[in-house]
Image (cartoon, rainbow, N blue to C red):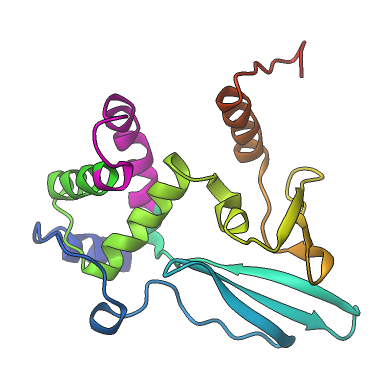
Amino acid sequence: MFSRLARTAELFRGTKVPDQQYRPGEHGPIVQDVEFEDRVVERYWLNPPFAYVVVTYDDQQDKHLYRVIEPSLDRFETDLIESLYDDVRTPLLYGAGQGDPEGVLKGELRRRLKKYGVETDVAGFYRLYYYLYRRFRGFGRIDPLMHDPAIEDISCDGYEVPLYVYHDDYQDIETNVSFDQDELDSYIVRMAQQAGRHISVGNP
């Protein structure tokens, strides 16, 4: 608890919020480089510089695995992004159609961070931006998969069950992406609304 409070105090000392484009060579990586014990077959960007995939091969199970890698958030950033999800939703709805969606979202994120008194660097700002964009402008948890032109189909068999994709090179392959119950239920409702459909208990 003490370390978390110290981290919070450190971040709340200023209101320095970057207003510049992200440059990898200058600001460092947004997403970490992850190593695996399984044999790495291929790795490639899905949504640079935010998300990439590592396809590995498990010799014991004799199968490929499709591992999505996204930016890591520490505990404070995780709590912060949950607050941002709630606070930026309404302004984004009212701001729909007012200029470029990415610019509107970045502007709202900067405004909220200044209001909170949170200081962050450029890479940290874009980590938060990525998850907000994924939530409100993208496809949520499956957003990285939707950026892969080699994927033809995505299958979900239930709560906490890894999604499977049909890949041009690997056919049916298990991913490390899954939904908990609340998240999947909310996602289904959101997708139905975007398609102009209504889902209820009586009309699933």
Depth check: give the residue in front, 80 or 137.
137
In the rendered image, which quarter is residue 98 located in?
top left
54 magenta-colored: no
Q: Quadrant of the N terminus?
A: bottom left
Depth check: give the residue in front, 140 or 169.
169
Q: Residue at x 61, y 51 (%)?
A: 142
Direction top: furthest residue: 202
Q: Residue at x 33, y 51 (%)?
A: 80
Q: Is residue 169 above or below residue 92?
A: below
In the rendered image, which quarter is residue 6 located in?
bottom left
Q: Is residue 164 above or below residue 158?
A: below
| Location of residue 202 in the rendering, given as x and y in whole percent from the top left corner | 77, 10
| Location of residue 190 in the rendering, given as x and y in whole percent from the top left corner | 57, 29
Residue range in magenta is 79-103
In-image side of 101 versus 154 (left or right): left
Depth check: give the residue in front, 148 or 81.
148
Q: Residue at x 25, y 66 (%)?
A: 7
| Magenta stretch, main secondary structure class | helix
